[in-house]
Image (cartoon, rainbow, N blue to C red):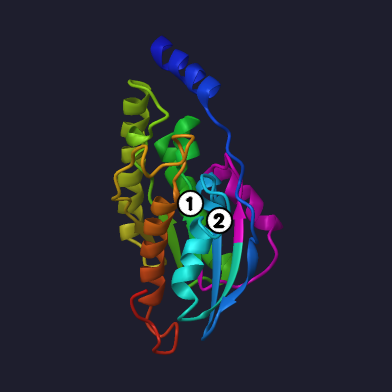
Amino acid sequence: MPVLLGQAIFVRTRYIALPEPAGARQGVAGDGPPLRLLIIGDSSAAGVGVATQTDALLGQVIARLRDHATVHYELVAQTGARTADVLEWLPDLPDAKYDFVVTALGVNDVTKGVSLRKWLGQQVSLIAQLGARFDTRKVIVSGLPPIGQFPLLPHPLRWVLGRQAARFDRHLHQLTAARTDCVALRFSMGLDENNMSEDGFHPGPTVYAAWAQEIAQIILAEPDLLDGTQGAP
């Protein structure tokens, strides 16, 4: 524990705090049947690691949907957010309806020491509240990335956090597999200095692109959503 604590302090001293990217967080884009999309979560949902929303998760998803639908989009995200924080936001969000809600949460829960049992309970509550509040067809839950590959983190801290993130992710997929109102994405891309941002902790453009591709594929495969226009992005 003293080693891990010392490494955590060391990481904070060398961490490059990147800003959330510039660009619109709500609007309409594309042409075709209406599709209502909400992305909600932490700094990765906000797009930290790239300069503009065009290269972030939101912009990359829209780019893959706009030829198939008129996308009415909204992004609600904040650096450092945990699942508990998003649950606190929900009552203050405007009333709206979304066909899909994409969540990006879990990394801060792991790094801030939230227990697995507590986090899973919060995830269950979040999925249920999103579906009921926004009349959502499906919640797309982003799985946890392999924190054990984050370049910023030294060993053994990287190993410890990586194991905990993998544990969270495994249980998250077990939870969502038994439900019809949500689906969990499995993060399968390897991470290193070449595809992560300069801070060694957040995605770079290619990671956001791969993530967006998986989200778009799920949306475009939804039966009847786009009146027969759905297909591979």
Tell whether position 90 is magenta.
yes
Callout 1 amino acid: Ala
Q: CA distance from mark 1 to mark 2?
A: 6 Å
In the rendered structure, the answer to whether residue 71 lies left or right of residue 209 reads: right
Position of the N terminus by quadrant: top left
Q: Earlier in the sequence, mark 1 or mark 2?
A: 2
Q: Nearer the viewer, residue 169 or 233?
A: 233
Please provide percent x and percent y for residue 140: 43, 62
* Category of crowding for the residue at label 2, using alpha-carbon neighbours closer than 10 angstroms: few (below 14), some (14–19), many (at least 20): many
Asked if the residues shown at circle 1 and circle 2 are in contact, with their CB atoms under 8 angstroms apart, the answer is yes
Residue in view at x 63 percent, y 56 percent = 90
Q: Nearer the viewer, residue 182 or 111?
A: 111
- Under circle 1, the secondary element is strand
Tell whether position 201 is magenta.
no
Residue in view at x 40 percent, y 37 percent = 116
Residue in view at x 52 percent, y 48 percent = 50
Residue in view at x 51 percent, y 53 percent = 125
Can you see residue 182? Answer: no
Please provide percent x and percent y for residue 226: 45, 84
Please provide percent x and percent y for residue 9: 51, 17
Q: Nearer the viewer, residue 3 or 155?
A: 155
* Residue 204, placed above or below residue 66: above
Q: Which residues are magenta?
A: 75-100
* Residue 158, placed above or below residue 143: above
Q: Which residue is mark 1?
A: 104
Q: Given the current orientation, which residue lies at the most extreme bottom position?
A: 227
- Under circle 2, the secondary element is strand
Please provide percent x and percent y for residue 95: 68, 68
* Residue 192, placed above or below residue 185: above
Q: Which residue is mark 2?
A: 40
